Image: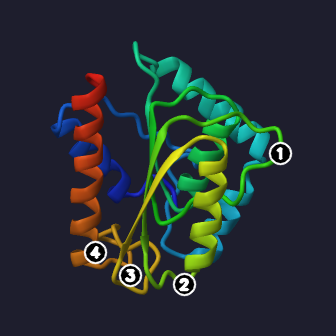
Amino acid sequence: MFGRRPAIVRAAGRLADLGFDTVAPDLFDGQTTTDVVTALALRDGWETPRLLDHLAEVVDRHAGQEPPVLIGWSWGASTAVRLALSGCPVRALVLFHGLAGAPAPGCSALSAPVAVHVADADPFLTPAEVEEAASGLRAVGADVTVSTYRCDTHLFTDAEHPDHDPVAAHSAWKAAERFLLDLTATNGAL
């Protein structure tokens, strides 16, 4: 929603340094922001079906032998969930700062593991909303792990955003890296 900010590019680089192939699609033609109102306007430029079709094409273009791991931040996290529930094959999901609401009736089953990383006092997500969404994903087959971090901001992993919390960000990244490396050890290269 805030665009492909430097934090997203750095995250892709960080994962590439661990040996993972990465793609960080730019959904807003280079536009980025830290302002919520501007971010909402950027987000609202996409209709959900068109967005999911576009992202499914990105996944198809970059697909390897294994389905991809989708990683999303905030709106990107909820979009990654919606993409997986639309039937796009995924190996796992890593979600920072958000996840989608309860799956819609008739959505695809999701047998992939899902790692969720959220602030314990996120101003946009209550613990009850996080648990409801996680329960909904479990109901369609996902193995969901929710990790909470002691902070009261939303985008706590983004070093250039006013929400940044370096302690929570470090902990969340270490947990996400362990999740991905464990996935690789269990199921082969990503």
Q: Amino acid at mark 2?
A: Pro
Q: CA distance from mark 3 to mark 4?
A: 14 Å
Q: Earlier in the sequence, mark 1 or mark 4?
A: 1
Q: What residue would you read off at disc 1? A: 105
Q: Name the spot of residue 11 as percent of width and height, x first.
A: 30, 50
Q: What residue would you read off at disc 4? A: 168
Q: Amino acid at mark 4?
A: Ala
Q: CA distance from mark 3 to mark 1?
A: 37 Å
Q: What residue would you read off at disc 2? A: 123
User: How many residues crowd around disc 3 within 10 Å: few (fewer than 14), some, or many (20 or more)?
Assistant: few
Left or right, residue 28 beside residue 53: left
Return the mark for residue 160: none
Q: Name the spot of residue 3 as percent of width and height, x first.
A: 51, 56
Closer to the camera in the image, 94 or 147: 147
Q: Amino acid at mark 3?
A: Pro
Left or right, residue 44 beside residue 138: right
Decide if residue 125 is in sight here: no
Q: Name the spot of residue 47 as percent of width and height, x first.
A: 78, 47
Q: Earlier in the sequence, mark 2 or mark 1?
A: 1
Identify the residue at image location x=30%, y=53%. 176
